[in-house]
Image (spheres, grey):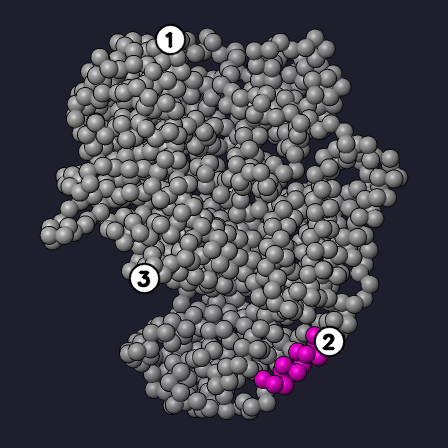
Amino acid sequence: MNFFFSGKTQWQRREGMAASSTKKTKLLQIFTQRIEWELGPDLNQIPLTHSYLSAAIGLLLEVRLESDFFGTPITTILWNNEWWYQDYFEKSSELVVYVTQEIEELFIFPKLQHLFEKLKNNEVMAAFIDFLVQLLSHGIGLIFPFVDSINNLKEELRCLVVILGDTDTSLEENLLAEFEAVANKAGCLVYSLFFATHLIDGTAVGALLEQIELLKFNIIKFSNLPPSSSIIKTDITTPEAAAVDSFSIIVSLLRDLEELISNMEDDLIVNMKGQINLLHQGLKLSLSFLKDIKVLRLLDIEELKEVVMRIRDVAYESDYLINSFLVGYARLWYLNIRIPNVIHKIKLIEIGIQEIEKKYNIGALKVAKDFSAQRSLHAKRNSDVEDIIVGLEDKTIDILDRLTGGKKHLQTLGIFGMPGLGKTTFAKKLYVHPTVNCYFDKLSWCIVSQAYQRKSVLIDILISLESELGRDMIFNMEEENLAEHIYKSLKGRRYLIVMDDIWDSNVWDDLRRCFPDDRNGSRILFTSRNRDVAPRNSIIHELPTLSNGQCWELLQKKVFGIETCPPQLLDVGNQIAISCCGLPLAVIVVAGILWTVDREKSAWENVGISLASYIFADKNNSTMQILELSYKHLPDHLKPCFLYFGACQKGKEIPVRKLKRLWIAEGFICKDERKSLESVAEEYLMELIGKSLVIVTGRRSDLGVKNCLIHDLLHDLCLRRAEEERFLTLVDDNYSIYGKHQRLYAPLCSVSLNPIYKASHLLLGRYGRHVRSFIGYLLMSPLNIVSMELLRVLDCWNTNSDDLVGIETLVHLRYLAIHAMPASIASFVNLEFFVVHNTISISSSLLKLARLRHLQAHKATFNKDCNSNQMVINNLEYLSNVCIHNVKDEEMLKCSPHLRKLKCDFKTLLADDDGTLSYCYPDLRFLTQLESLRMIYFNSLNRCTKDGKINFPSNIKKLTLFGFRLPWEEMSIIGALPNLEILKLEYNAMKGEIWETRDGEFQQLRFLKLEGLKNFSKWDEVSFSSEHFPKLQQLVLHYCFNLKEIPCAMGEIETLQLIDVERPQYVGQVEPKSKAH
């Protein structure tokens, strides 16, 4: 809400004042939010005050900035300005006095304190001082005549805010009174600087700085008192919760400390090196203890619980102090007194650990076998075990008969059952069944979920129908256009649409007109927990729970695969199966636990005892209790990764690559000198999949996991545990900014724009110094995030940088996903992952970010200020959708020699010596580390007229070409690439009818996709040999309309597993031996 611009101002009409106008706008935003904050949620209960004060301040700043009024009292300005009283109220002395008093009270702390009686004094005081700092930051160079002194004051006040927000600050009454005195004096000074400069003399700032020096002396004196050895009260009440929180914080903080130690050059900081090293060593010891805690946690030891809580407190303190220092707000003097204090606490923790080990003789337990660590998931188990269904053989036959037989008119069939029965798994089995695939011309799968959004569902349906429309075009369509395209795509075809997880009967009414009824046997299949959502005349199939025998059968298959259960485990295994209450989800999750323990009777009995105790504790919620047990059995390094799924949209597929990048940016991934962080993140994900907690929903062409999701019940578990452990906080109507939240999640459906939410949202930046991540939607703008300096992850799906006031202060950002590129991009010196959902211009400032590894945009071009001769080498490893339209663009790529993945649009234009224009292909052989390359050629009608050959880096493993119109003879260049495993030739990538393959080519190729090659009609039968593709596993042929047959020799490739043909009538004349189509 902004009331400053009620009328046209002289300021707006002046020319040449763009920079000042921007600063003024920010000042006005700060004042507006400050007034709304002070008045609280009941803004409209004080007549005229908010709009009145806003307009008054807007006017005063306008005339103040013109400098003719410098030193003029506020009353004179109000009396003499005709615009003021004509547009608002009649001239009156009472009104002028009232406005003067109200504006001045914005700068007095006691009034603010009175309005927030329920909050701690240091919290309110920190927000008040932060308000003053923001005004000083944006007013410097605009209003203030003595900039150096004001800058010094601003930095000192910022440090006071850090101290007030310190997790260990329990200020005694006298010291808190000194803070209040400084705050009020600073408020009076800032008020005078803006509105009463006639009251300021040259000594005012100096006097305040002297008072701050005295306060600092007393802070040092207070901090030198012996630290308390008693446990600090915390808002996390369980040791297990504290362990999870501590683990993720310490892993991230150790990386920050290592960087700080390696970059210590300033003499002042070098003096702290010994203390920083001691802190680093102490935190490593704490991390080691947390890794061992899984075994120790089996013992109910009160002292152990206390130690875990202490580690959590130390982790919070250390993280806050170090990162406040790195961002430049905590001064060195404060770090000097606080770091020794923290180190002392760590030493007390070490003593406590030693005493526990000695008292309970549990040292041997720390070296006991931890089978979840010893047994490699990759060596012993395929993480993508085929979904196993038991007990539904008769239902499968029945539903298949109804899908492919019976009446010809459009019918709806429903699969109904309680959560955890496997409705989605069963529906997928039907969806991919060979009988279904052969019977229907078109198939589509969409997830509806409880948070139904019509456009999202329509997009999913149209994309899964494999429409020839591009994904970008589909995403940008209006709802009615989407519905029309779906209808046209299905018209005259026999189709099956599966709608998973419907919660409301209105969904069908909302979508039914998209589905034509041509009386050709088309079907709609849906799954739901609620029978009542079924359309009229639907055929409903209710899934039963499993019998005890079926539970045991499923458990054995998930744990042992094709192996036989050892005899000593038969009885205990059967009892565990009975405890799963007939729910397939419970059986699968318990199987994930059993798979990680030793195959000994005692180990299984321990799991059985834990399982039984959970169920008997709450028989009415046995399923959730079983899932709770699976979470408790996770290694601590996986718990943050699992809880992070709570920040993903429920029921929606999650892109795995994005998930791994977020894990890395959050600091969840432990550093391994032998592997990249991405590889370790992949291993973490595969462990979660192997434990049946994460479902694979899509695979890449190299068979790696592309998309995944978790069951709705597991999502509920993630959110509940994440809230309990303060790991992740849902921003809703009950959200409070004063909690020490680590991560904030704001889904679209979680909030309403009531006054309470609005007030808390406005305050988010006032006291958000402990927030490390913000993920979700921004329902209000602008949002003040100026105080969230420690933010590492900012993933705002619908937000422009202009909507985020203070985004330039977020120098700790590791991951930024936003709608448009911020002007302050150069300030994000720690940024590693940058995603922009729009077209951007890549500036030299962006490329100079030393840590930036991932740059993804809807479309990107190089800015004119980019010159390869003046640029330094950057560390980009991933660059997507960049335009290479001239030689200069191609030269710019040479500044990114570390690229491993590149997606580009190519259109190179060169001038020959005689002045004529000619086209040539890019030569990217200088990218020696490039493994994945996707190139779209936009000069398909203008074949290369210079040099004639296309070349690729020899290290390429995945190659996608689009629109090149290369003759088939040039395939030898591609076939000679020694490491090529995946090749995709799409839409006129090649020109010609016959592909003549040759010996010695494509020796490593595992995946081949040909799509939209309109002229391609056949392989040369005479020359074709299975030896030309000796390792081929998948052959995909889509929209190759002239292709009539597949060579018989293709069936002789021993490794071939799949032939996927979009038009069934073209499926080849031979079936590969024992392979699936």
Residue name at image x 87 percent, y 36 percent: 360
- The residue beneath circle 2 is 217
- The residue beneath circle 3 is 865
Give how far apart the Cα atoms at labels 2 and 3 are.
49 Å
Q: Farthest residue in the front direction?
A: 913
**Mark before the other along the chain sequence, 1 or 2:** 2
Percent of width and height locating residue 844: 37, 59
Give how far apart the Cα atoms at labels 1 and 2 are.
83 Å
Q: What secondary structure is found at the residue carrying circle 1? A: loop
Task: Determine whether 215 is above or below 279 in the image.
Answer: below
Under mark 2, the amino acid is Phe
Residue 787 is marked as none
Look at the numbered discs 1 and 2 and tell me whether their residues touch, using CB distance below 8 Å: no
- Whether residue 522 sits left or right of residue 561 in the image: it is left
State which region is magenta.
205-216
The one nearer the camera, 521 or 789, is 789
Bin the neighbour count of mark 3 within 10 Å (Cα to Cα): few under 14, some 14-19, many 20 and up: few
Query: What is the chief secondary structure element of the magenta stretch?
Result: helix
Q: Quadrant of residue 482?
A: top left
Q: Nearer the viewer, mark 2 or mark 3?
A: 3
The one nearer the camera, 1056 or 316, is 1056
- The residue beneath circle 1 is 1073
